Image (cartoon, rainbow, N blue to C red):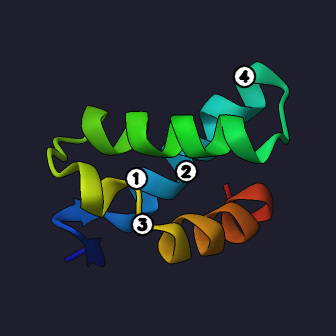
Amino acid sequence: MPEILYKIPISLWVCGTAQKMKKRRSTDVRVWTREWFETYQDLGGTNRHSGNKGCPRAAASAFGTWAC
């Protein structure tokens, strides 16, 4: 079973966001923040607070830039 964060598979969330960033050719943290929450919603997330928590988002940003 995949690792889950706020009922969302982490790898899909991180890599989905990273792919959107690559498509945009952006490294802007503000863009990452928007895409992070949008990907959360795309994957079925509904809680605005969970989808916008800073610590998982920042860790995923550092990880996603090279892992996906």
Q: Secondary structure at mark 3?
A: loop
Q: Earlier in the sequence, mark 4 or mark 3?
A: 4
Report the side of 24 relative to 56 (left or right).
right
Q: Amino acid at mark 1?
A: Leu
The image's mark for residue 15 is 2
Q: Using a 10 Å C-alpha cutoff, classify the residue at mark 2 as few (fewer than 14 neighbours), some (14 to 19) or many (20 or more).
A: many
Q: Which residue is mark 4?
A: 23
User: Which residue is found at the position 68% from the left and 34% from the top?
Assistant: 31
Q: Which residue is the site of mark 3?
A: 53
Taking the image as shown, residue 14 lies to the left or right of residue 30, namely left
Mark 2, secondary structure of its residue = helix
Q: Residue at x 27, y 58 (%)?
A: 49
Q: Earlier in the sequence, mark 1 or mark 4?
A: 1
Residue sitting nearer the eye, 23 or 37:
37
Q: Residues within 10 Å of mark 4 (few under 14, many from 20)?
A: few
The foreground one among 56 and 7 is 56
Picture disc at residue 12 = 1
Give coordinates of residue 64: x percent, y percent: 67, 60
